[in-house]
Image: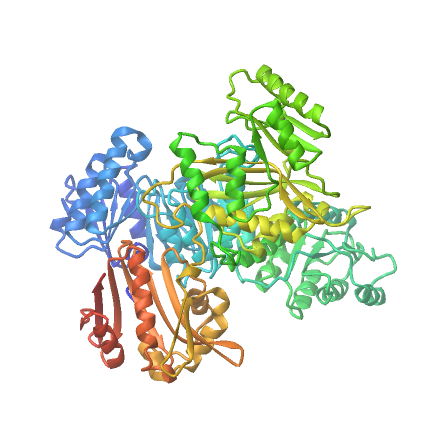
Amino acid sequence: MRPHYLNKLFAPDSVAVFGASEKPGSVGGQVFRNLQGAGYGGRLFPVNPKHESVFGQPCYPDLADIGHMVDMVVIATPAPTVPGIVRDCGEAGVEVAVVMSAGFGESGGRGKRLERELQEYARYYGIRVLGPNCLGVMRPSKGVNATFSHNAAEPGNLALVSQSGALCTAILDWARPHGVGFSAMVSLGDAADVDFGDVLDYLALDAETSSILLYVEGIHQTRRFMSGLRSAARLKPVIVVKAGRHAAGSRAAMSHTGALVGGDDVFEAALDRAGAVRADTIDQLFAAAQMLAERPKVAGDRLGIVTNAGGPGVLATDRAVDVGVAVPELADKTLERLDQVLPKGWSRANPLDILGDATPERYSQAITACLEDPNLDGVLAMLTPQAMTDPVGAAEGVVEARQGGDKPVLACWMGEEQVAPAWQRFLEAQVPYFRSPEAAVEAFAYLARHRRNQELLMQVPGPHAQREGPDVEGARLIIEGALAEHRKVLSEMESKAVLTAFGLPVLPSVEVQSANQALVMAESVGFPVAMKINSPDISHKSDVGGVRLNITNAQAVRHAYNDLLERVKQQRPDARISGVILERMYGEDYARELLVGVLRDPVFGPVISFGAGGTAVEILRDRSVALPPLNRFIAERLIGETRIATMLGAYRNMPAADRDALVQVLLRISEMVCELPHIQELDINPLMASPEGARVVDARIGVASPTPTLEPYGHMAIHPFPAHLGARFQLADGRDITIRPIRPEDAEIEQEFVRNLSEESKYFRFMRTLHELTQEMLVRFTQIDYDREMAFIAVTRREGQEVELGVARYTINPDGESCEFAIVVADEWRRLGIGTRLAQTLLESAKDRGIRVVEGEMLSQNTEMRALAERLGFTVRASEEDPGGLQMRKEL
């Protein structure tokens, strides 16, 4: 496998600094001094035609005069000079440029033209550009400090990626006295080329990085961001701080959903689906990183609190309620056990107040009991220094108890001077400790949320959830008909027809244009009926008096028709009125009013919302949001995150609503969103949920023509599972074989497959000795991003279980037009045509994806692979980099 395309950014063998000088305040001069001061061991070249030497080293007028290969350049010259320098770097074979210069896209018209010119040269020559207008990059372990910051990062295992250079310097200044070190620091600046997705892609496999911290102000490349974030979060904790939490990034729209959902809601939902965790402040950022660094296992969000004072326990409990952490009752056996070892005055409840004279032994006994309590998922030990308190001894008791359990233990020793030695003991024992109850509880909340989000990350829904496919073509024709009439909003009848095409349970409606027609239709559908004004200009009918309910007789129907028209004309004289919608009154008992909506977020695309419905939705503001595609797990979580979820169950004389029917509605909506990129907004309000099922009573859909160049599902931030790519065939002996895309739940059969390969097959595939896949490799191979890679496995059934027979995979290169592929078949299943089938399926998928060139590497002694490659039309030649290897190449 070729080195990562950002390798030279983090480990360059040689660096040239354009604009280096000894002039005070010079950005280039500060960069050069920082590289020298960090102990950079590679070749370092100052470039500036105005100087013969800089800080004791010969200075070169331009790149061509250096006479040595340069891996990375740092550019700190005026913006108009930068595109030309990048062009010269491309001619010289430079791989990476860090552009610190300002005056590009952020500065208006001329700057944007310069940025486009810079991007064009970078694409043409294949140079990766960090910046412009960035602080630079640090890699402490390699002595790389290519920044103009006066702060230097200490070596460590945290990686920091930020859109704000100023924030980087502030964090670095904070980190040194707190003993926090970094594996890397990257300032993205304007991100004209290298962005979050690229850096995350590198850090995901970086051996020096155990946790990743992100500071985000805005997303430029959504798919790339989500792809890199999901890839990294599968392997290590990713914690994100987002600026502008209260800015409404999504446009307010014609729907209730548009009024309810803001850009910050959507960003939160995106992080959840990516398996990352969000922090609100810099302190919380590092608290979360500290808590998640060692990937402690936690089964849930139930916290036990052990304290030597009641007040701090109350503060911790209050904060737990705020952040969604449960403080449950202790199990009966735990109470009995603690009664035997604690004084009579202990609280006999959670929080466990073990009294102000608590000894180290008392702390150890209480924590040990909590760690064995089935009602708890973690323990917070708290201490306030009192007359009889031994802070260090109590800390020792916590450390001792923690060693005997497998649940996370946190400490909060409040104070300063008296408890400082105890903090040091916690630091030595790697027990996460905090100075306030709130911070400690928040840290546990991050741990619990990380677990929940990792469950979401494992979900890979396909675009279709129902066995019988929807009538996508019929729905598309309805929408295209409206667009052909230059309408952006479907009528209620059209909206309900589209929903019906996707199998949603819609209350039938009819359009009427006169009072007599209304009477005839009311007699046909049966009383009581509901009547609603039909106007393309009125979104919320009840706001203008455009709804009449429970009409029970013929005279009332004609009166209601005329009254509706007159009332609405008074309220909205400008509105076009097409008549009235009439439908039989919804009559199920014990119904709840709900809302399901879709909004097109400007960054993350379609978003599905669920919550309380009715006329007061904007006041109640009870909703949750999720990015499609959905499956049952995600839909259940979407419902469960709302307050109204508790009202869907049985209470008082109300039987429970049919929750499964609601899940099915959300799955059908997800299908619509996947298959119809035309949909900009959707409001189903109300969606009535009763014990008998769910029914769409009112709906409206906003549409627009999709971008014609979009790839399938290109309008979505998360690519659905490509279930349609599966195929079946029979071997000559009649055995059935299935070839399908790999899924996360295939981890076990993938591990078994590799474990059973011969040593030769393992060596040919991985080009090194390997007994079985590491956990990291297993995650990488089975939890893939279908937007930028693909893996097909061949399986058969044996004794009721699937068995993997072979696997073929490709990964798209950064150019988006080529990919690297690999293939391996189980030894006992070779020469049966499985390898050929896998390879052909893979090549067809790559071609459909727009890939032009497929490349691969193999060892020269792998004769079977060479024969297969040549049969498939690959050109095979000796590797230029590996004397014992061969390179394969095929143009599609």
Q: Is residue 73 left or right of residue 763?
A: left
Residue 555, compared with residue 321, is above or below; it is above
Is residue 337 at least partly visible in the picture? Answer: yes
In the image, what residue occupies the spot 48% across and 65% down?
744
Q: Is residue 614 left or right of residue 491?
A: right
Indicate the position of residue 835 as horizontal and vertical percent values.
32, 75
Closer to the camera in the image, 382 or 623 = 623
Is residue 282 at least partly visible in the picture? Answer: no
Please tell me in which quadrant of the rendered image residue 337 appears. bottom right
Q: Is residue 472 left or right of residue 257?
A: left
The number of numbered badges drawn on the structure is: 0
Location of the C terminus (image quadrant):
bottom left
Closer to the camera in the image, 410 or 424 = 410
Q: How is the image coloured?
A: rainbow
Indicate the position of residue 726 as horizontal and vertical percent values.
41, 65
Location of the N terminus (image quadrant):
bottom left
In the image, what residue occupies the spot 33% across and 64% down?
810
In the image, what residue occupies the spot 39% across and 78% down?
770
Indicate the position of residue 38 as horizontal and vertical percent values.
34, 53
Residue 584, compared with residue 639, is above or below; it is above
Please tell me in which quadrant of the rendered image residue 739 appears. bottom left
Indicate the position of residue 608 as horizontal and vertical percent values.
53, 44
